[in-house]
Amino acid sequence: MTQSTQIRLRRRPEGEPTPDDFETVTTELPALEDGQVLLRVRYLSLDPYMRGRMSDAESYADPLQLGDVVVGGTVAEVVESRSDRRQVGDLVLSYSGWQSHAVADARHTRALDDAHPPSTALGVLGMPGFTAYAGLLLLGRPEEGETVVVAAATGPVGSAVGQIARIRGARAVGIAGGPEKCRALVEEFGFDAAVDHRAPDFRERLAEAVPDGIDVYFENVGGQVWRAVMRHLNLYARVPVCGLVAGYNDTSAPEGPDRLDAFMRLVLTKSLTVRGFIQNEFEREHFGAFLEEMSAWVADGRVRYREDVTHGLENAVDAFVGMLAGRNFGKTVVEL
Amino acid sequence: MTQSTQIRLRRRPEGEPTPDDFETVTTELPALEDGQVLLRVRYLSLDPYMRGRMSDAESYADPLQLGDVVVGGTVAEVVESRSDRRQVGDLVLSYSGWQSHAVADARHTRALDDAHPPSTALGVLGMPGFTAYAGLLLLGRPEEGETVVVAAATGPVGSAVGQIARIRGARAVGIAGGPEKCRALVEEFGFDAAVDHRAPDFRERLAEAVPDGIDVYFENVGGQVWRAVMRHLNLYARVPVCGLVAGYNDTSAPEGPDRLDAFMRLVLTKSLTVRGFIQNEFEREHFGAFLEEMSAWVADGRVRYREDVTHGLENAVDAFVGMLAGRNFGKTVVEL
């Protein structure tokens, strides 16, 4: 029998998650059935959407139940196989969550080639990269010379958004927290401009960075950044909304006045398109093209990526809380 | 020389417009130049968007200047012509505003046939009808069996939205103020259900009227109706936004809490599409098809319309204020 060390949801976090919201349990995995593989998890992906799954508010996916292993994408090695599809030693993408080992249906795993480091299947060549690609190209549809703005811009989604925007001939402006991230946006990721949302003169700097207004705002943050950005949206601007991480730990609505009506007036007077999406809406039709195109861009250096690697399952909760607070730099993964 | 009696903007209204915000002036019109026509206005259109033009807040069109004749679509008779395009006696659609006579470039007029009453060129077969048609079919895109909800549903836009939705096989639910309007929605306009937003149990009645949720909400009202509607929006619901008349007289934002973040979460979790628009975005490409199709629907009784006719230019301001407050029933026109 194989044992798995698992991080389970013990209670629903109120605001920022704390270690007491989780429990670590070692459990025996069942024997393999036909078609299944036994996986040793090598990397787990930490992503903002997981915070939503820990709450029981209505959302696009059912919430975790108390006692469930925390969900998430993983890169794993096949250590035992009862499927013709997978050999022992294969590296696969699976959805095993926060645990050391797992049993999975081989059909629910995707084989990884060795053209790129395996952890990229959780980032630039995985769900976050595809979120950027689909949201920007299918919904944002930037045209040459237009201005694209994205926040959390050194994160795996934001950095891909800006770089793809530039490949399409648009001007990319990134918003990030702190001078170090802002410097990397311009020097490492090739953004045209970067604005530090923690700077006291953030609003003035943002205005300077978008002299022609904003044609596409790729929304993955929300909150005060969104309030500052919206006043610069141009006529017919597009706002794909894939995340609102600034508010994921909120426990109540901000104080008034109620800005909803003013926002709807902006939608009307600027003929805005605001479009929420989850990447799997587009997966079946577009993931293949994404993987081909993005792999080529990564290979030739047109798209760069950063990873923020934490070692050890026991540090996953801390890394997750830090990511929600913006303390990561690049795609957050835990290496086991 | 021909004299024109004109209603001009004297000062910008604060909240609900009052008679003192306007002044009535009789002025001499200049002699015609080549290519121009002299028009006697027969009908003027009163539309909610005019309230926006009276304010100097930034919007999709420049505001009226103090002293300007209030703008608006008009049906007029050519009483003198220096253009080959128009004969004396022709009825035309023009954009002459709130006045009895006007000089216009003949190219800026559209000849009306006599297949339908001329005032319909301001309503069901004009800008409001086209707003409904374009917003519903190009942006709302209802599919057979889906639920379409529209407020101000006995107005010229709302009544057309519901009837076109039914022609496309969707279920139409109208929201209107008072039992008389609600009865007319079902009995006269053929809506599947009607809900009175003034009823104390409005929210419960709305919930009962949309048991399968809402796939398209055609937004022309905003305010409290919007807050009640949004919780019923289905996954992938579309919200074309063409007006927000409930707030046009507002002078400050409503009290908190600030619902903007909660709304953005709804956009995200339901993959909503919220799209502001002004009908002239689609006019060049789609107005011809609209006029042909809508004329046929009106002729065969599949689309009905109501007009709320006020007599005399001197009553235009009262009629306008009443319309903003929802006291009209159908398309508001002033017959001169």
Image (cartoon, coloured by chain):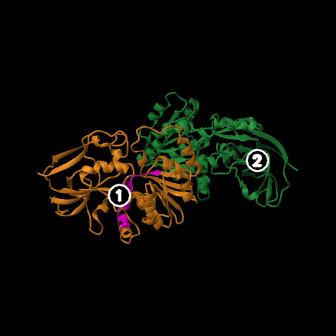
Chain colours: A orange, B green
Does the image show residue B174? no
**What's drawn in magenta, residue-wise?**
A275-294
Q: In the image, is residue A91 part of the stretch drawn in magenta?
A: no
Per the rendering, the mark at residue A331 is: 1
Kind of residue at badge 1: Lys
Q: Residue at x 57, y 48 (%)?
A: A266
Q: Chain of mark 2?
A: B
Residue closest to the eye, A34 or A323: A323
Q: How many marks are shown on the rendered structure?
A: 2
Q: Residue at x 54, y 59 (%)?
A: A209
Q: Residue at x 38, y 67 (%)?
A: A293
Q: Which residue is outermost to the bottom?
A: A300
Q: Which residue does the numbered mark 2 point to in the structure image?
A: B68
Does residue B15 sit above or below A5 in this rendering?
above
Does the image show residue B308? yes
Quarter assignment of residue A295: bottom left
Residue A276, x across and y down, in percent: 44, 50
Does residue B76 sit above or below A127 in this rendering?
above
Kind of residue at badge 2: Asp
Residue B249, x across and y down, in percent: 64, 38
Instruction: Tell whether B287 sits left or right of A301.
Output: right
Per the rendering, the mark at residue A22 is: none
